[in-house]
Amino acid sequence: MYFDTHAHLDDQQFREDQPAVLERARTAGVELILNAASDLASSKKTLELTRKYDFVYGAVGIHPHEAKEFQEQDLAQLGELAKQPRIVAIGEIGLDYHYDFSPRETQGRVFREMIRLAQKLRLPIVIHDREAHEDTWRIVQEEKAAEIGGVFHCYSGSWPWAQEIIKQGFYIALGGPVTFKNARKVVEVAQKVPLDVLLLETDCPYLAPVPYRGKRNEPAFLPKVAETIAAIKGISVEEVAAATTANAKKLFSI
């Protein structure tokens, strides 16, 4: 059994065939999915998904790309959404210095607001960190986010950074990029990360693994990620599936 710990099934790319996508996921052995929101509207759609499908759970929050649109009055609505059954985390939240779609100061402020909301509700966080490792880690430390824990999704940093993250009790999630030919850093992380702190994800519809690279990603492709990690670690894919599913259930209290 696989657990896709990061999907965006509310994305427009799934508008026409969402039920078929979820059926293919179940056929592929993906029996649990966490849908990660990106803004208030996406958070509401995520809640709808959790009510429609009993194997879909949700995270609500503000993605750094959308931080510029965040209004203080949105916080109360997010808080109410986060209290609903099957909403198990605050996410996807963090910093993105690759695109800088929102001003960095705004990203940092909203990231802190989301961590504080998670602390208030005692929920783990799903962290987006792209080319912003030092500032992301500084905010995580200053806000004492380790008290609630969480996962660094689609981890793209170095192994030394990963070691610090793991020491603080956070999980590392790997997805499609671990299958890419030029993915040296993430392959090293996959090789060295302890199995008991590893999660699997697709980040669909983005970052499809080889041999689907360039196509729309979907949860049914998750076994390709697991197979690659198993080969890197020299263990069975069954071990990877079992451990990562157990880890995700523990983190999200499922």
Image (tube, rainbow, N blue to C red):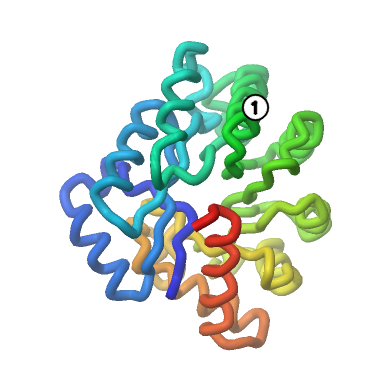
Element type where label 1 sits in the image = helix
From this view, report whether residue 177 is shown above or below residue 78.
below
Residue sitting at x 19%, y 56%: 19
- Mark 1 residue crowding within 10 angstroms, few (<14) / some (14–19) / many (20+): some
Residue sitting at x 62%, y 23%: 113
From this view, report whether residue 212 is shown above or below residue 238.
above
Residue 73 visible in the displayed image:
yes
Residue 215 visible in the displayed image:
no
From this view, report whether residue 3 is shown above or below residue 45.
below
x and y, in percent, of residue 4 in the image: 45, 61
The residue positioned farthest toward the left in the image shown: 16
State the quadrant of the N terminus.
Answer: bottom left
Residue 32: image quadrant is bottom left
Residue sitting at x 71%, y 62%: 185
Camera-side residue: 31 or 85?
85
Residue 247: image quadrant is bottom right
Residue 216: image quadrant is bottom left
Q: Left or right? Give the position of 248 relative to 58.
A: right
Q: Amino acid at mark 1?
A: Arg
Residue sitting at x 32%, y 47%: 50
Count of numbered marks: 1
x and y, in percent, of residue 91 in the image: 52, 39
x and y, in percent, of residue 165 in the image: 77, 51
Camera-side residue: 138 or 58?
58
x and y, in percent, of residue 172 in the image: 65, 58
* Circle 1 residue: 116
Q: Left or right? Give the position of 11 relative to 60.
A: left
From this view, report whether residue 172 is shown above or below residue 85.
below
